[in-house]
Every structure is written in C-alpha cells, then in structure tokens.
C-alpha cells in the first residue's frame, strides 16, 4: 500500500478526499495548513473527521500564514465557519506536533517511498524545502490539487486568473512547482468536470458525508443554481489511484506572485523565443488537463457507499 502524507486546509472537499484515500492508501500522517480555515481550526477539523471515520492517523500543525503576502480571508462562505458545514460540535483542541519536522523526517527516513498529496496552500512543503532542500530528490511523488490552465475555460475560482490554493500563497506555489520535486498537478481544468449532486451523495446512504456536504451544496444552489459540488481535492487521490483515467501534458511551471494576476498558474509557452525566459532550466512536471468523468465518479461514490 502506498505511503502518503496528506497536507490539507481541511474543508468539506478535503474531508471527502481524506475519506476516499483512507480506503486505499497508507496515510502515515495528516499535516494541516491555513486556507479554507485558520490552521488552528484545520487541526481541530482533522482530529474530529478522523475520529468520525475511525482513522487513527496522527495530525500535525503547519503554517498559519503565507510566505510573503498578507493572508486572505478563509473560505468560510463555501465551507461554513468551522470548515465542515457547522454540523458537529468539536471537542478537540488545536495542539499538534510540528508539520514541517514531520514532513522532513518522514521523507528522509523513507527515501523513495513517500507520496505527498497536497490539497491546500503549498506553504508547508515550501518551508520544508527551504529547511531541507535534499528532500526534493527523496520524495516518490507529489500530487497537487491546484492551479488552472484554461482548458474548457477554467482559469480561476478565487479571481478570474487564480485558483484558491495557489492564490492563498502564490510564492509557495511558485517555489514548489519550479523545484526538483516530481510533481503532478490536478487543476480546475479537470476538477470542475467532475461534479456530484446532492442526490448522488445522499444515495450513498452515508449520513456523515451527507451532513457535512449540506452547507456546501446549499451555497452552490444559491450561487450557481445547482445543488452539487466539484470533487476538487478527491481528484488528487483519484489520480494517484488510477492515473490512466487522466490525460496529461508535460511542461515546466510557474506561478505569478504579484499584480492583478497574482496566483495565476502558467505553462511554459511553446515555440516562442524571448530575451528573458522565466522557465529556463526548470524541471518538466505533469499537468492533468482531461479526465474520464464517469470512471472517477463511479469509483468515488462506490468508496463512499462501501468503505465506511
């Protein structure tokens, strides 16, 4: 079973991704970061949700703010004030051991064995790279839910140009994507294709997932006229489990770190010579641009119905 660390700003779609992964992967730790909620709430949410799904994975506390910009507000209008739809009282505290040390130590102790599933802002792994750059060569794989590259018209969800996770800490995203890490990006180009309805969630018969999804679904119904949700973070897990369901391209990558396009994710332009090349000497990474929607949905919904 593949050993993974899940790095998360746990909101509703993160919780779905953790549950999905729990049935198929060896989750050796969950590291938390600010994003959908403050990091203190992310720790509490991770503890509570793991308790709800009987997952004995240890929780770690990571970064509370971006590397270089002022923090943007959390995503509470989508996920609720507590990030999990406000359906549970949460008795847990926000104390947890350091996420950065755990990431570094785990990778060094298990060279070539650890896959990172990054489904929040990329601040934790950026800080880990700064402290121990050698881990880039020791990681087995990094799968990131983030970015948007314009396929099928998907260019951003926080601004017209930027996806939420990269927008929350563009400097961290730029560092991670342009590093020596073996990265696969699962962007909005594919996550916005895989939509599940409230009825499909309810039909799994799983009361936990139905209840935490309700706030998100009501937001979607009000704002989009559709009682459903994009799976987003679960697509990173889906790629790791079944990469054959995804069409990918290779390119070096950058993220815009200032100006009106801050947080925008960029592929290296083809067939164009310029005097300055911001992609020079960067490693090519994998980017998912299309997906077999039916296979992903079938596998995901089956997991929710039968693994808990």
Image: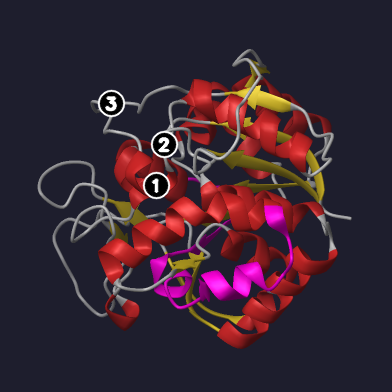
Q: Nearer the viewer, residue 198 or 192?
A: 198
Residue 17 on the magenta segment:
no
Q: Quick check: marks 2 and 3 in contact, CB under 8 Å?
A: no
Q: Quick check: marks 1 and 2 in contact, CB under 8 Å?
A: yes
Mark 1 nearby-residue class (10 Å; few <14, some 14–19, many ≥20): many
Q: Residue at x 43, y 26 (%)?
A: 38
Helix, strand or loop at label 2? It is loop
Q: Can you identify the residue that label 3 sits on?
A: 68
Q: Is residue 128 above or below residue 77?
A: above
Residue 183 on the magenta segment:
yes
Q: Which circle, 1 or 2, is nearer the viewer?
A: 2
Q: Classify residue 69 as left or right of residue 115.
A: left
Q: Nearer the viewer, residue 60 or 203?
A: 203
* Location of residue 171 in the rendering, given as x and y in whole percent from the top left corner: 32, 37
Q: Kindly report the distance in space between the C-alpha atoms of the residues bearing marks 1 and 2.
A: 7 Å
Of callouts 1 and 3, which one flags the residue occurring earlier in the amino acid sequence? 3
Q: Can you identify the residue that label 2 sits on?
A: 35
Q: Residue at x 49, y 25 (%)?
A: 39
Q: Classify residue 247 as left or right of residue 22.
A: left
Which label is found at residue 183? none
Q: In this picture, which residue range is highlighted in magenta?
A: 179-207
* Location of residue 102 in the rendering, given as x and y in whole percent from the top left corner: 70, 24
Quadrant of the rendered image containing residue 137: top right
Of callouts 2 and 3, which one flags the residue occurring earlier in the amino acid sequence? 2
């Amino acid at each position: 079973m593949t050993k993974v660390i899940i790095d998360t700003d746990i909101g509703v779609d993160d919780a779905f991704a953790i549950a999905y992964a729990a049935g198929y992967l060896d989750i050796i730790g969950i590291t938390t970061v600010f994003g959908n909620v403050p990091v203190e709430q992310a720790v509490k949410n991770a503890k509570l949700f793991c308790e709800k799904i009987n997952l004995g994975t240890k929780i770690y506390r990571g970064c509370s703010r971006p590397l270089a910009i002022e923090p943007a507000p959390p995503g509470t209008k989508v996920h609720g004030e507590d990030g999990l739809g406000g359906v549970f009282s949460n008795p847990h505290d926000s104390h947890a051991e350091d996420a950065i040390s755990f990431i570094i130590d785990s990778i060094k102790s298990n060279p070539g064995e650890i896959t990172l599933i990054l489904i929040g802002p990329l601040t934790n792994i950026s800080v880990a790279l700064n402290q121990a750059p050698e881990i880039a060569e020791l990681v087995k794989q990094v799968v990131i839910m983030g970015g948007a590259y314009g396929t099928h018209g998907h260019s951003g969800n926080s601004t017209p140009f930027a996806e939420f996770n990269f927008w929350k800490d563009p400097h961290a995203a730029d560092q991670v994507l342009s590093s020596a890490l073996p990265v696969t990006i699962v962007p909005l180009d594919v996550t916005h294709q895989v939509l599940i309805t409230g009825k499909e969630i309810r039909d799994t018969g799983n009361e936990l997932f139905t209840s935490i999804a309700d706030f998100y679904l009501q937001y979607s119904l009000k704002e989009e006229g559709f009682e459903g949700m994009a799976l987003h973070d679960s697509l990173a897990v889906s790629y790791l489990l079944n990469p054959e369901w995804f069409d990918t391209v290779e390119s070096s990558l950058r993220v815009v770190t200032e100006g009106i396009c801050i947080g925008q994710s960029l592929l290296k332009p083809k067939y164009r010579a310029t005097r300055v090349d911001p992609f020079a000497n960067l490693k090519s990474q994998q980017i998912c641009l299309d997906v077999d929607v039916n296979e992903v949905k079938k596998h995901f919904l089956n997991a929710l119905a039968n693994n808990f």
